[in-house]
Image (cartoon, helix red, strand yellow):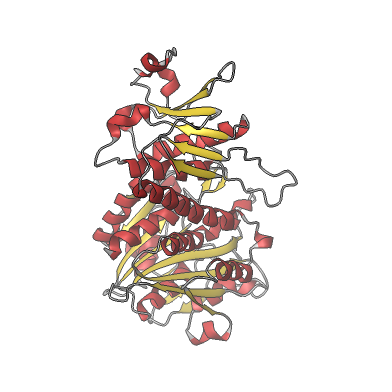
Amino acid sequence: MNFIVDRNNGLKAQTVVYPVFKDQMDFEAIHGLTIHSHMGESGKCTWFFGRNQEENILLVGLGEQKKFQMDRLRAAFGTAGRALNQEKQKQVRVSYECLQKLADASCTQVDLVMATVEGWLLGTYAFDAYKSKKAERHVELVQIELETSDALEQAIQLGKIRAEGVIFARELGNEPANRLRPETFVKRIRQQFSNTSVSITVYQGEELEKRQMNGLLSVGKGSKYPPAFVELRYCTDPSKPLVALVGKGMTYDAGGISLKSGRDLSDMRMDMCGAAAVVGALDIIVKSQMAVNLLVLVATAENIPDGGAMLPGDVIQYPNGVTVQVGNTDAEGRLILADALIHAKNLGAVECVDIATLTGACIAALGERMAGVWGDDALVDDLRHVGQFAGDRVWPMPLEDEYEDLLKSHYADISNIGKGPYAGAITAALFLRKFVDPSMKWAHVDMAGPMEATETKGYLVAGATGYGARLLADFVAVRSK
């Protein structure tokens, strides 16, 4: 599929796509169509089929103009892309005729083009690796009706790169557990960055013991597939401060001995979506050739009950001197992230963001479309700002010192779970803070809610969302400036 920017109307498209607002319907005066406000509702698609070789017209709704955000445009073109494939359209034109008033400093033509490409590619994505009938994609050419320029050509390429990074993260998250063990996860990462300037170091077995990554070793004891720790370095400007991205990579989380309930647990293959986010972000950063000094860390394991598995009541000793009582083996993510946070500082990171599908409590607080973020104010502000633009939204949450009492243990420094049923997401963040060196700025993103879409809508397709890839890539870009 090809995107071009060209105002030349010489292309005989089968369909012209117009994104429209529900409260701006002067469109009909130009095209002689009877258009109603409900056709501009966010997510709405309305067809006007041409006769006698005339072009079809497809309206895609953006909702009220005053509520417009770039994510609505992505969602509109995700929806439009699927509708056009369903109608087996091959050549399509896109007109921003009804969006002309948006062309200002807050929403440039570059933003429009990039969002169009992102939304289209993400909305027409399908994970069909294990289906006998593959998804059909009929659209071959999309002509965007703007004056050609280098900036807009670059916007197309960047939109593709950003979509590819998210799709890489989705592909990893959607893989069934029997196809993505820790060792195969490592292989996928190696393959993705094999022909780039990313340097990759993998620690397993005795190497993990040597570095006292006791959280990862303890969590992975129950599985016959050994845990691994992946260190990726990408430096195009060594003068910049070293920024670290840390991802939780549980390729399957059954809860260990503290076995999860009998509900459908197939989505627990997505407990590595934090790790997928950081490698998806790295993919975007590398292909975009950003000037960065970046460290990406992935801790990966399976949390499976077995005769040799970690037990409730076990005590883990970390190399920073902190001892942890395992109150619940299903609170395993924080145990492996602790290793990574210590390692990030040992390697010289001055700023660090960890991202994980960490707590159901965060879903209860913020729902399924927004992640929680804790930590340094400057990092949190940047994550919130770039997340608003990228569509990977985060909401600041408190690190309430008083709640540290909930993590007290009778026979270790802290427990890995808080006492009582409340503030679970906050106590998880407070736990992680115990392993952050005070000299390293740090933020923690709990993405348990937006890791998965339960239905196909906009540019989200049912399954893993790839959340965090664009968020972290944009964050690194901002911090590197």
Rendered residue at 52%/72% (across/down): 313
Quadrant where the N terminus is found in the figure: top right
Left or right placement of residue 446 versus residue 129 in this view = left
Rendered residue at 35%/26% (across/down): 98
Give the quarter of the image for residue 24.
Answer: top left
Residue 49 image position (x, y, % from top left)? 56, 19
Whether 259 is drawn above or below 139: the answer is: below
Q: Can you see residue 38? A: yes
Q: Can you see residue 393? A: no
Quadrant where the C terminus is found in the figure: bottom left
Viewer-proximal residue among 452 and 195: 195
Residue 354 image position (x, y, % from top left)? 40, 64
Residue 366 image position (x, y, % from top left)? 40, 45
- View extreme (right): residue: 132
Viewer-proximal residue among 408 and 441: 441
Residue 101 image position (x, y, % from top left)? 28, 30
Left or right placement of residue 311 versus residue 19 in this view = right
Viewer-proximal residue among 160 and 166: 160
Whether 355 is drawn above or below 262: the answer is: below
Rendered residue at 45%/48% (across/down): 363
